Amino acid sequence: MKELIEKRNAMLDELDGILAKAKTETRAFDEAELARITEVKAEIAKIDATIKIEEEVRNLEKGTVVQAGATPTEAEVRALAIEKEERDFVELLVEGRAVNFPAGTNGSVIPVTIANKIIARVKELSPLYALATKYDVKGALNIPAYNWQDHTTAYQGAEFTAVSASAGTFTNVQLNGFVLGSLALISKSLINRTDIDVVPFVVEQIAMSIANFLENELINGTVASAKLQGLVTVASESQFAGATTLVITDVELVKMKNKLKSVYQGSASWLMHPDTLSYIQTLKDTTGRFLIGNDLSADGGHILLGKPVMLSDNMPLNGVGKFPIFYGDFSALHVKVEQGVEVQVLLEKYAEQHALGVVAWASMDSKVVEPQKILGYLGK
C-alpha cells in the first residue's frame, strides 16, 4: 500500500506541473498534455480502487476450515492465535495501529507471543541463565534452602539410645521483582521494507540486550537491596583462594575441581572470561610443553580437565579480590523472571530520527540459593 500511495502522490505532482506550465504560458492544454492528463487520472482512479479494496480485505478475518464433526486441537488454536498476534504486531510497527492488543496497567501494548519469544531467546543467548534454576511467578518468592552437608548421619550406639540430632536447619531465601527495561531503536526504513521479517529482528535486538545485562548481573550482581545478586556473593566456604598474586596455576585448577563434592560433579562446568581460558590453555612446564593438554593441531572444544567451559565477556579477569573462575553446578543460582513482560512501541518519540522505539519491561531477581554447588576462584 505504501508504494501505491507514493506512486499516486507522484502522479498528482505531475498533474500540478502540467497545470502550472499552462497557466504560466497563459494558454490551453495541447493535445499531448490532454492525453497525459486523461491517462494519469485513469491511473489514479485504479490506484484509489486498489487501496479501497485492500483496506476492505485487511478488515476481513480469515476463517478456519474445520472438517465436519472435528474439533481444532489445542496446538492448532494456539498456532492461529500466535499468527494473528504477530500480524497485529507488525501492523502496529508499520502503521501505528494497535486496536487488537489489550493495554497493560501502564497503558503499554502487550503482545504475549513476542514477550515469550524474547525470554526464550534470552535463554539461548546466555548459557549461564539456561543452566540456572528458573521460576515464573509474580510477586515475592520464598525458597526454602537447606545445606545437606550440615546434616549428620551416625550410628545409633548402644541399644535404646537416641540418635544424635542433626545441626542442619532450613533457611528462607526471598526472590523479589526488580524492574528493568530494554530499549531497541528500529529504523522506519527497515520496517517499511516488505522483504524484511520485522518480528525476529525486534526479538533478537531486545533479547541480546536483556541477555547481556542479565548475564552480567548473574555474575557480578551485588548484595544491594535493589539489585540482582550474582555468583560473586558465594559464601567464604565456597571460595578457593589463589596462592600467588595474579597467577593461576594448573595445580590450583586440579585442586579446585576436586574440592567440589562428587554429587555435584556430574553437572559441573567452568565459567570464565575468554582471556582467562587463553591464559590457562597456554600454561607450560619447564620444558615448554602445554600443561592442560592443549593440542594446536586439533580443536577439542572448550574443555578443561574433562569439563565444559562456558565463556562470558562479563566475567572479571584475574585480580586481587576478583573471581576470574567459577566451577560447579550452576543450578545453584536461582532466577525469577516473570513471563509477564510488557512490550511497548514508542511511535512518536524518535520520529525525528525516522525510527521508532520498542521497549520491553521485565521483573527479575536472582540469588545463589545453593552455595555448596559452586566454587569461586578468589584472586590474590
Image (cartoon, rainbow, N blue to C red):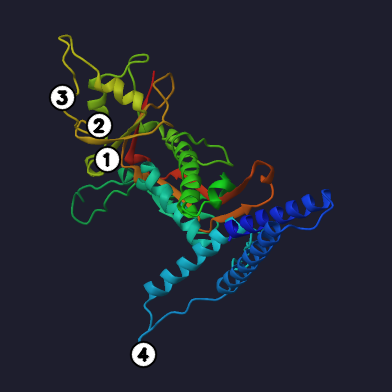
Residue to which mark 3 is pinned: 297
Q: Mark 1 to mark 2: distance in Å?
A: 9 Å
List the residue tagged with mark 1.
Answer: 268
Q: Please tell me which of labels 2 and 3 falls first in the chain.
A: 2
Question: As displayed, is residue 326 above or below residue 78?
Answer: above
Callout 1: few (<14), some (14-19), or many (20+) C-alpha neighbours within 10 Å? many
Quarter where residue 300 is shown = top left
- For disc 4, the marked residue is 68
First in sequence: mark 1 or mark 3?
A: 1
Q: Quadrant of the N terminus?
A: bottom right
The residue located at (34%, 38%) in the rendering is 374
- The alpha-carbon separation of the residues under discs 1 and 3 comes to 27 Å
- Three-letter residue code for mark 1: Ala
Res. 257 mark: 2
- Return the disc, 3 or 4, that comes first in the chain's sequence: 4
Q: Disc 1 vs disc 3: Cβ atoms closer than 8 Å?
A: no
Q: CA distance from mark 2 to mark 3?
A: 26 Å
Q: Nearer the viewer, residue 192 or 300?
A: 192
* Foreground tag (2 vs 4): 4
For label 1, the SS is loop
Q: Of all residues shown, which one is farthest toward the right?
A: 26
